């Protein structure tokens, strides 16, 4: 019997994969049009009769609709005793809703050739939806059920808990995951950002359906809802859909206030782990997304470690010395903290050398900054590559939602490249001095004992 069940599940997954293939293919056809005509794209602000607001890119090139939404309040809303509850909630919303149990709900998603998923970050809870235009009445009803009437039945709940716990156990056997957990704990002690977002084996095992209901009621509210929609739907149609899906949610959530926090610097933490390579991760304070200097820091980081094959760190660590296969850095503007983070991995006997190189490149950036040619090359890459970030209709909808959650303005896509072009050598050198001069990053290493 078990073998038959597994075979049936495998066949169902194969049918789902095949049925979604056409949907994805249509999505990418839309993207080709979007990239070619990005300057002509119009973002409409749509407000429903019940006051639900969304941003819409209306296009009928292909018959698909993608919708992405976010509620304020992600994993940072978990209490110490309920760590992992928001993440678990994200796994359960498509495991049965309304009159449909888990199997019936999943079967209905397959029959309608639709995509529906949920996820949680540090500061926001996300939903993603994609549908053929012809099925929109039925697929939006499925979205409404998932958002408003999730069942949280015991059997799928126990299955999702088991999968989550299994993932937690696997992560504890991966050096990079261990490094990430220890880095967060080190730079954000006694703060929600320092806790494991998926929880622990113990906390997840104790979570109940009532815990999920409480957390959903806490986060799902209209006051923080942000929505991005792309595709074959008119503004009037969307206004009606918005009320159908979201109007019955409460006006206000019940979020716990999260304090702003500065990451702890100048710490060195090593975790002994039997591995042929040592995982290295580091962090130090960055710039908030609304800081006028953020774009200068963004360009600076591209030169330092953000450029995949052109950055200083890549050249020094991989090209010149062959210490690592990959190395990079990136800006992380959380809602309550701002970071520059980075990572690499190398042989244990070379880990100290790699760390020294990373520090020296930061000092170099603070003291001399990039050359005019390096700055020009970075700006050319960042402006030319921007349209490629919109690699599917779903990602475009996600971009619209992200711009809203970061409060960048409806004209951000039009202004973004101008902001990059406006970055100067002086601006890059100023943020580099501010970030690196006299500030030691916190480093976490996981592997064999360092020499």
Image (cartoon, helix red, strand yellow):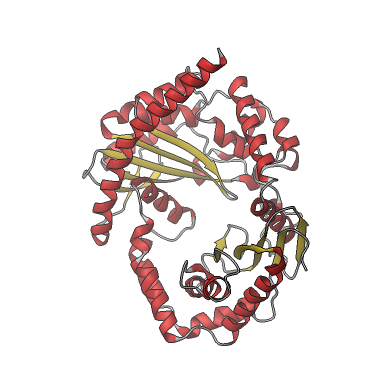
**Image position, residue 442 (x, y; %):** 71, 67
The front one of 449 and 176 is: 449
Image-based side of 128 in relation to 413, left or right: right
The front one of 16 and 338 is: 16
Q: Is residue 319 above or below residue 26?
A: below
Q: Quadrant of the C terminus?
A: bottom right
* Residue 37 in view: no
Image-based side of 41 in relation to 419, left or right: left
Q: Quadrant of the N terminus?
A: top right
Q: Is residue 32 above or below residue 102?
A: below
Q: Is residue 51 above or below residue 184?
A: above
Image mark count: 0
**Image position, residue 40 (x, y; %):** 23, 59
Q: Residue drawn 65% across and 42% down?
A: 198
The front one of 54 and 352 is: 352
The front one of 136 and 277 is: 277
Residue 334 in which image quadrant = bottom right
**Residue projecting furthest to the top:** 1
**Image position, residue 236 (x, y; %):** 27, 39
Image-based side of 310 in relation to 444, left or right: left
**Image position, residue 2 (x, y; %):** 56, 16
* Residue 47 in view: yes
Residue 38 in which image quadrant = bottom left
């Amino acid at each position: 019997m078990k073998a038959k069940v597994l075979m049936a599940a495998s066949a169902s997954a194969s049918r789902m994969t095949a049925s979604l293939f056409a949907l994805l293919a249509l999505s990418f056809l839309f993207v080709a049009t979007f990239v070619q005509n990005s300057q002509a794209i119009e973002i409409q602000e749509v407000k429903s009769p019940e006051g639900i607001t969304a941003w819409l890119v209306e296009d009928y090139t292909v018959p698909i609709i993608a919708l992405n939404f976010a509620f304020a309040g992600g994993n940072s809303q978990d209490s110490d005793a309920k760590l992992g509850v928001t993440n678990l909630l994200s796994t359960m919303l498509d495991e049965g809703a309304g009159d449909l149990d888990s199997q019936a709900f999943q079967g209905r998603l397959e029959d309608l050739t639709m995509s529906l998923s949920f996820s949680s970050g540090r500061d926001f809870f996300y939903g993603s939806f994609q549908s053929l235009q012809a099925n929109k009445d039925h697929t939006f009803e499925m979205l409404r059920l998932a958002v408003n009437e999730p069942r949280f039945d015991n059997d799928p709940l126990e299955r999702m808990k088991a999968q989550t716990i299994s993932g937690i156990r696997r992560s504890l056997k991966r050096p990079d995951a261990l490094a990430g957990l220890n880095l967060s704990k080190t730079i954000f002690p006694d703060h929600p950002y320092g806790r494991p977002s998926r929880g622990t084996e113990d906390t997840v095992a104790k979570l109940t359906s009532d815990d999920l209901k409480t957390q959903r009621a806490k986060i799902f509210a209209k006051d923080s809802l942000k929505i991005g929609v792309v595709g074959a739907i008119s503004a009037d149609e969307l206004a009606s859909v918005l009320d159908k899906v979201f109007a019955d949610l409460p006006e206000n959530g019940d979020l716990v206030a999260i304090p702003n926090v500065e990451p702890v610097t100048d710490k060195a933490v090593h975790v002994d782990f039997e591995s042929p390579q040592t995982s290295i991760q580091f962090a130090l304070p960055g710039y908030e997304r609304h800081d006028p200097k953020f774009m200068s820091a963004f360009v600076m980081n591209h030169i330092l470690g953000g450029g995949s094959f052109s950055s200083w760190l890549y050249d020094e660590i991989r090209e010149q010395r062959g210490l690592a296969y990959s190395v990079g850095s990136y800006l992380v503007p959380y809602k309550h903290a701002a970071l520059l983070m980075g990572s690499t991995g190398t042989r244990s006997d070379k880990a100290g050398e790699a760390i020294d190189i990373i520090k020296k490149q930061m000092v170099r950036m603070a003291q001399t900054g990039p050359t005019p040619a390096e700055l020009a090359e970075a700006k050319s890459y960042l402006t030319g590559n921007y349209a490629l970030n919109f690699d599917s209709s779903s990602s475009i909808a996600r971009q619209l939602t992200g711009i809203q959650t970061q409060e960048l303005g409806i004209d951000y896509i039009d202004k973004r490249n101008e902001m990059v072009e406006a970055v100067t050598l002086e601006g890059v050198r100023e943020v580099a001095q501010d970030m690196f001069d006299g500030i030691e990053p916190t480093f976490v290493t996981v592997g064999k004992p360092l020499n």
